[in-house]
Structure formats: C-alpha cells, structure tokens
Amino acid sequence: MSDLLRIETADHVTTLTLDRPERMNPLGQAGDGDAFAAACDAINADMGVRCVILTGAGRAFSAGGDIRAMKEKSGNFGGTAPEIADGYRDNIHKVLRALYGLRVPLIAAVNGPAIGLGCDLACLADMRLAGADAKFGVTFLKLGIIPGDGGTWILPRIIGEARAAELFYTGEVIDAATALDWGLVSRVVDDAALMDEARALAAKVAAMPPHALRQAKNLMRQGRGTSYDAALEMAANAQALMHSTADHMEGVDALLEKRAPRFTGQ
C-alpha cells in the first residue's frame, strides 16, 4: 500500500498532499498509481467535491522520480526494458492519468521544487500558484533519460514550444518569478501564504454550480484538439442541459435579486 497521499475534504474542496516530506515527495513507489487512481475516482464520483488542491508536504512540491530507486535499479526502474516500460504504464502513468482525468478544477499549490515528474504533475493542474521559493525544472536529460511522463505533450501547451524546448534540452531550473513571466503559474505569493491563497481560490471555484463546473472543464479540455465548429456543437448540447437545472434558475434569480447565489447541484 502506498504512503504517498494525505487526503482532506472540507467545504466542497479536497486537498491532496504528497506526503513523503523527508525525501522531498518522490514518486514511483509501488502502489502510487493505485493511490492516485482511487483518490481521483472517489472525487469524480462525489458531486459534493467541486475543486481539488494538490500540494506537497514539507519543503518541496515533489522532486520527481525516486532517484534512489534509479540508482538501485529497483521498483519501477528495475528489470528488463519491457518491464520498466510496463512499470511506467502501470504505476507512474497511472498517477498522471488519474490527475488528468479529474472532472473538477485542479489547483496546484507549488511549494518549493517541482522537478521532473513533479513539474509534470503541477502542469496537469488547471491553475498553478507558486510560493516564492518554488522552482520548476524538467531535468530528465541530466540523468541520461528522456521526459517519460507526458511533459513533452503538456508543457509546450502552457509556455510554448520554444521555452519548453529550452527547459527540456538544457535541464535548467527556473525560479518562481521566471515561471510567472513565462505563464507557467498565474500567481506568486509568500511561501507562508501559499495554502491560504490556494484555499481562497478554491473557495471561489467551489461556489460555482457543480454540474456547470464539470461541463466547463470538459469543454476546455476537448477544445484543445477539436475544430471550432465541433466546439460550438459540444457547447450547444452542454448548454441545453445546463438550462434545465435548478442551479441555472438560482443563478438567474440571484442576479436579478442582487444577492449571492446558493448552488446545490440540482
């Protein structure tokens, strides 16, 4: 059983904390993929959860893959080439697929280094906030390996091909200010205020109607790889469903009555 995640839910927000602080929250141990899959499946099945925060315990968000296991050729990094490939598919990639498959908005609260696989996790979030001491790097080539966690697909979509290439091909690590300038994060805050800022943002998200939230995220996701005409068609169908909800009428009434809406998921 994995010891990776600490899970807490309050006020429609679930916080997932990577909880191996003594080693800067490495990933890739046996069961990590199953732990993430179970947590994300439970969130998707619970309409009471409207937003997720992902952060790391201690002084790091995540230092990425387990370097000791790489040195020892153990766990995901031991065996034949086909066995290592299966380890990525069945464990490490299961972590990434679980986060990517979240149906509710995901906020990464990046405290300290987010390196390699840790950076890829942060990039899967819909919104990223960074503490002042946060650092970002995709340093795979420095270890003589390639970006094996889907980062070559997601990072260029966030910061553009040229800047993503610069990070991948040099292995350089950038600070929080550079990450903000490049659009990798939307906000940099004092380290001590990071979780308060993340919770405040999550509270704003969680105040929205849950069905519409999930539909909006799905439309943004689908829009990455479809035509404008197809996006309009998907929007028309989703919008028709939303017009039939009680939350839609609550939003209309609240606006006309000049009060805050109270969305119930109906």
Image (tube, grey):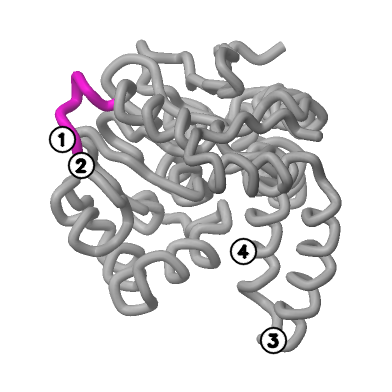
Dot 4 or dot 3: first in sequence order is: 4
> Quick check: marks 2 and 1 in contact, CB under 8 Å?
yes
Q: Disc 2 marks which amino acid?
A: Val
Mark 3 vs 1, N-terminal side = 1
Name the image quarter holding the C terminus. top right
Q: Nearer the viewer, residue 11 or 193?
A: 11
> How many numbered marks are there?
4
Is disc 4 in contact with disc 3, using a CB cutoff of under 8 Å? no
Q: Nearer the viewer's eye, disc 2 or disc 1?
A: 2
- The stretch in magenta equals 189-194
Q: Which mark identifies residue 132?
A: 1
Residue plotted at (36% across, 53% down): 138
Query: Per the image, is 33 magenta?
Result: no
The CA span between labels 3 and 2 is: 34 Å
Question: Label 4 belongs to which residue?
Answer: 220
Q: Is residue 212 left or right of residue 191?
A: right
